Image: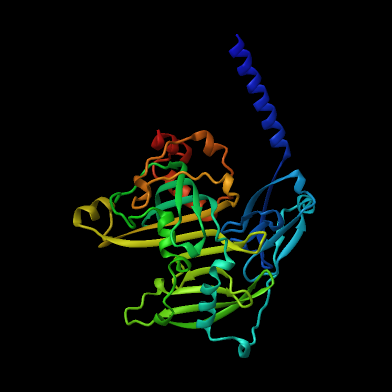
Amino acid sequence: MYLLKKTILLFIITLSVTTLYSQDILKIEGVVLDETSRGVSYAAIGIPSKWIGTSSNEDGEFLLELSKKNLLDTLEVSSIGYITSKILVEDFLALNEKVITLKEDIVSLDEVNIMNPSHYVQLAFKNLKKNTVSSTHELKVLNRFFTVEKEKAKFLIEHYIKVKDKGPSSGDVNRIEIVEGRKSVDYRYFPNVKLKRTYPIHLMTQMNPLRNGIPYRNYKWSKIGDTSYDGEDIIIIQGQKNSNKRRPYQDPILYIGMDTYKVYKTTNESATLVYLYKKNKDGKMYLSYHNYFTRQYHELNKTQQSILKTTDDKFKISVRNEVVVLGIETDKKKIKTKSSNVYQKNIEDIKVEYNSIFWNTFNFPPPTEFYKQKVKDLESIHGVPLETQFNLANN
């Protein structure tokens, strides 16, 4: 009887705390547009002074959790190429349409005062440790992995991960903990084709030019554009490898601040690799978003052509991996990242216990048009809803 009363009391206390907590939470949902009403991808939205923030998705939509204590705080919205917008949280909530429109920041740099592009690259790396969060921190990450065959999604895996890191100047990450995971039914025709044999977070660091360094003399550096971010002029510099076997997907493009030499974004000529960085309250940069796309062609024999009802000699298989940084923890006392042995493992080979309660209560970033279309692909194969697939494939 005593244990029953104690259990009931604990339940009531937990329910009361949960109710009070939920009443204090403000869910800020909206969209960031440019002056032509197009969504601004990967804009930074938050309260930098309190280290609270998120990013918009590919379509400009965002979700941010705040407290009622933040009503009088200033919400800042910034993105490369636009003038930073500021609005009080309570004023944003009062808007009939939760839309923030960013104005383009037109930049025309004086070419006379611009250094040789290679010097900007060298200075960016020289100041990398100073300009980034280089002490021990933990990133809270949502990792999404799609396998696509002939433009149709056939497999989806999502992992919620904690990553212990010291920033881009440290090489690979220190530790990865896979906290939760789930996957769809695997509809791949070629399930054994492995495009990459490394867990996505490790692959992300291996391909990152800021982490691996760039041999300057092996590249020809040129200015290909200019823009701005949060009041600083940015010079866009591309490196082209001095080789007859040049591969565009390997040529880096860096967005470097002209005054601070901070790197705000890196990509490649084929735009299959993107890294975005944003500022913390101290003005230091940390990773906020990454995506990677790759493809290969699998040769078909006559039997496979017959089964697939095609006359094509090759079958296109591609993967897209997306890393969304949901938060950052810098208090070493609160960093308790456990180690998951995933270094040389494909993401589809990793077994993670499925927790439906976690995923049903998880605050996802708003779904992009790409995500919604790929979910439709998965559901259209046999008419099975994605939620049903999660229950079937993970139990």
Q: In this image, 300 relative to 125: left or right?
A: left
Q: How many marks?
A: 0
Q: Quadrant of residue 132 in the image? A: bottom right
Residue 203's spot in the image, x, y percent? 40, 58
Q: Nearer the viewer, residue 306 or 259?
A: 259
Q: Is residue 50 above or below residue 361?
A: below
Query: Quick one: which residue is furthest to the bottom in this view?
Result: 112
Query: Quick one: which residue is furthest to the top in this view?
Result: 1
Query: Quick one: which residue is furthest to the left in this view?
Result: 302
Q: How is the image coloured?
A: rainbow
Residue 43's spot in the image, x, y percent? 62, 61
Residue 226's spot in the image, x, y percent? 60, 78
Task: Identify which residue is drawn at 50% across, 82% down.
Answer: 118
| Placement of the C terminus among the 4 image quadrants | top left
Task: Identify which residue is drawn at 50% across, 34% down.
Answer: 356
Instruction: Tell me if I can see residue 376 in this picture.
Output: no
Query: Quick one: which residue is furthest to the front in this view?
Result: 333
| Placement of the N terminus among the 4 image quadrants | top right
Q: Is residue 89 above or below residue 20?
A: below
Residue 58's spot in the image, x, y percent? 56, 59
Q: Is residue 91 above or below residue 33?
A: above
Q: Quadrant of residue 235 in the image? A: bottom right
Instruction: Tell me if I can see residue 154 in this picture.
Output: yes
Q: In this image, 154 relative to 33: left or right?
A: left
